[in-house]
Every structure is written in structure tokens, then in C-alpha cells.
Image (cartoon, rainbow, N blue to C red):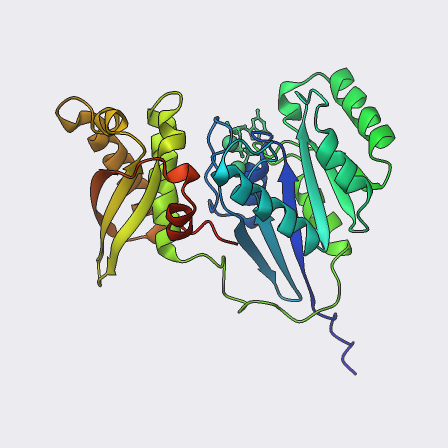
């Protein structure tokens, strides 16, 4: 007689933590694809992004969330509601901290102390620390978040201990049929990733407040046999920012376009024709209607 097959397990895993601790890097390492944009600037992830990992007898649905911050404007409120809703539906929480943690994260730790959801606490970026510092952080967390079921040092960037994270998550996954088709990698449409790739390049190429004032819309996404034709708009809040985005003789915008297109061609495995326009949409970050239009309603 054949042995009984393993029961199918499925569940939701929320990746939460402060800005820049490496949440998006970790999700990409766990899912094995670059789904979530990674930059050295805080608050680049604005939405909740699902990354789905499928195995023969499991389906893990990760959600990468914006970093936990004190809301300063309407967009922040929307970003935080993504974080809190992802806490409520989770089967497992991956709470990411890093070796630079200053321990001013009380509000979220307070919330985590009250949850019944299993918490795997990760101390990231240990590739940049001495053994003693790492030990100190681990001891701190065992003391301050005693209901964390695991406390593990990792390097998301170098994929150190990330396989362990996967195992720990799998062990805590409930028996459940898959939530999404088993060939699906994410719940977001392709054009969402295209917009995110443009946004990532903006974060990498411009300084200070400019990237935070930008939103990207894909107005047209036409997939043909060998090429994808895209028309997109970068929205800024003021006309001075429009000038900065475009740059002298359009040089700056050209860089954004070229770099984003190269990345899109690797992601979609097709040639991409990309057209980018720049428009002013005054104060979109504080305008509920504009936020709605850009998809920031939960
Ligand atoms: P998020 O804001 O929490 O999503 O953080 P990101 O994933 O965007 O990463 C923020 C920055 O930290 C980026 O520059 C990453 O390359 C870097 N980073 C992430 N994980 C590691 C790590 O394990 N080691 C090091 N040295 N850097 C990392
Ligand atoms: K970041
Ligand atoms: Mg992120």
C-alpha cells in the first residue's frame, strides 16, 4: 500500500518591521523572485505585496508591508492600515529587526506582545556585525518579546539562515487547501510591478523629498507576441519637481526610462517599449481622492 500523502498546508505570513530593516529583501529571498522593490531609502514599499511560494504540499502566502512608522500624512495612514490588516490575517508573523535597531519600536512591540499569532523574530544584517553584537541583540529580544516563538539571526542579503526561516514557517502552517492557483506568484497584476520598477529607479536616481512626492501610473500595457508596449505617467506634487524629474534636456528622465526598461525586460522576458510622461497632481499625498485613484484603498 502507498503511504498516505502529506496533508496540504497553506497560510499567510506577514513580514513586518521598521523601514529599511530588510523586509523586501527577505521576501524576495524567500520567494526567489524580485517582487518587492528594494532601495536604501525608508518607506519605498507603500502597498501590501503578496509573494506566493508553492510546493507540492504547501502554499505560503507572504505579505511584504510598508515599514512601521508614525503617520505624518494621509498616505502614511493608508500605509499603516496595510500593516495592521496584515497582522490580523496572519498565520505566522515574521518580525524583522536589524542589528542597528535603536529600540524605539515600542508601539509595535506592544501590539505583538498581545497577539496569539506565532512570531518568528529575525535579527537581520548580521553580515555587518560582530558575533558579540549579534548575541546582545538576540538576548535583548528574548527578554523584551518573550512570546516570540523563535529568535533567529539572519542575513537576507546573503541568504544566511533564510532556508531555516522557511522551515520554521512551514512547521507552523495550518492544514489547509491552497488559497490561490498553484502556478501563481503574486496577487498583483503585471502593470503593478512595471510601475514599481519605475518607482524604484526614481528612488535610486533622485535625492531627498523628490521620490516621496512621486507616484507612477501605467496608463497602457499592451502585450504583443514579442514586445510589451507601455505608456506611463509619473505624478509629482509641484511643477518644480517636474523639472527635476525631467532634468536638463530630459537627461534625468531618460536614465529612469532606460534603467526601468532593462529591468522590465528581465522580469517579463520580453522586449519592452516604454514611454514616460510627467504630470503635476498637486498634493496627491494628502488628497483622499487621488490616493484612491492610485490604489491606496484597502
Ligand atoms: P525594507 O524597507 O525593510 O523593505 O528594506 P529593504 O529590503 O528595502 O532593504 C533596505 C536596505 O538594506 C537595502 O539597501 C538592502 O540592500 C539592505 N539589506 C537588506 N538585507 C540586508 C542584509 O542582510 N545585509 C545587509 N548588509 N544589507 C541588507
Ligand atoms: K527600503
Ligand atoms: Mg520594503
Q: Residue at x 40, y 21 (%)?
A: 208
Q: In this view, does 140 lie to the left or right of 177?
A: right
Visible residue check, residue 232: yes
Q: Is residue 146 left or right of residue 234?
A: right
129 w.r.t. 88: above or below: above
145 w.r.t. 100: above or below: below
Q: Position of residue 296 (x, y in %)?
A: 46, 49
50 w.r.t. 66: above or below: below
Q: Residue at x 78, y 76 (%)?
A: 3
Q: Residue at x 25, y 60 (%)?
A: 223
What count of labels does the image hold? Answer: 0
Q: Position of residue 201 (x, y in %)?
A: 35, 33
Q: Residue at x 84, y 25 (%)?
A: 139
171 and 198: which one is in front?
Answer: 198
Q: In which quarter of the image is residue 129?
A: top right
Q: Quadrant of residue 109?
A: top right
Q: Where is residue 135 in the image (x, y as percent from the top left)?
A: 80, 22
Image quadrant in which the N terminus is located: bottom right
Q: Quadrant of residue 286?
A: top left
Q: Is residue 190 left or right of residue 3?
A: left
The outermost residue toward the left is 249
Q: Where is residue 141 in the image (x, y as percent from the top left)?
A: 80, 29
Visible residue check, residue 153: no
Amino acid at each position: 500500500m502507498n503511504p498516505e500523502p502529506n496533508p496540504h498546508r497553506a497560510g499567510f505570513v506577514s513580514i513586518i518591521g521598521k523601514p529599511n530593516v530588510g523586509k523586501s529583501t527577505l521576501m524576495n529571498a524567500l520567494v526567489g523572485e524580485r517582487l518587492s522593490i528594494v532601495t536604501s531609502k525608508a518607506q519605498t514599499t507603500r502597498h501590501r505585496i503578496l509573494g506566493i511560494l508553492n510546493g507540492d504540499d504547501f502554499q505560503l502566502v507572504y505579505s511584504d508591508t510598508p515599514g512601521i512608522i508614525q503617520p505624518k500624512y494621509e498616505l502614511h495612514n493608508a500605509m499603516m492600515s496595510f500593516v495592521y490588516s496584515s497582522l490580523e490575517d496572519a498565520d505566522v508573523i515574521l518580525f524583522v529587526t536589524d542589528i542597528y535597531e535603536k529600540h524605539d519600536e515600542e508601539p509595535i512591540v506592544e501590539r505583538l506582545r498581545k497577539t496569539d499569532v506565532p512570531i518568528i523574530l529575525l535579527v537581520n544584517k548580521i553580515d555587518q556585525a560582530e558575533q558579540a553584537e549579534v548575541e546582545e541583540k538576540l538576548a535583548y529580544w528574548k527578554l523584551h518579546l518573550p512570546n516570540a516563538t523563535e529568535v533567529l539571526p539572519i542575513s537576507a542579503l546573503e541568504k544566511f539562515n533564510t532556508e531555516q526561516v522557511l522551515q520554521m514557517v512551514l512547521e507552523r502552517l495550518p492544514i489547509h487547501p491552497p488559497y490561490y492557483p498553484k502556478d501563481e506568484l503574486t496577487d498583483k497584476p503585471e502593470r503593478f510591478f512595471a510601475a514599481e520598477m519605475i518607482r524604484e529607479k526614481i528612488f535610486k536616481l533622485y535625492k531627498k523629498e523628490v521620490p516621496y512626492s512621486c507616484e507612477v501610473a501605467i496608463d497602457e500595457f499592451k502585450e504583443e507576441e514579442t514586445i510589451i508596449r507601455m505608456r506611463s505617467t509619473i505624478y509629482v506634487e509641484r511643477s518644480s519637481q517636474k523639472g527635476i524629474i525631467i532634468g536638463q534636456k530630459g537627461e534625468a528622465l531618460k536614465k529612469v526610462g532606460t534603467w526601468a526598461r532593462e529591468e522590465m525586460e528581465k522580469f517579463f522576458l520580453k522586449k519592452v517599449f516604454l514611454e514616460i510622461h510627467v504630470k503635476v497632481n498637486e498634493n496627491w499625498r494628502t488628497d483622499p481622492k487621488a490616493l484612491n485613484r492610485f490604489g491606496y484603498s484597502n
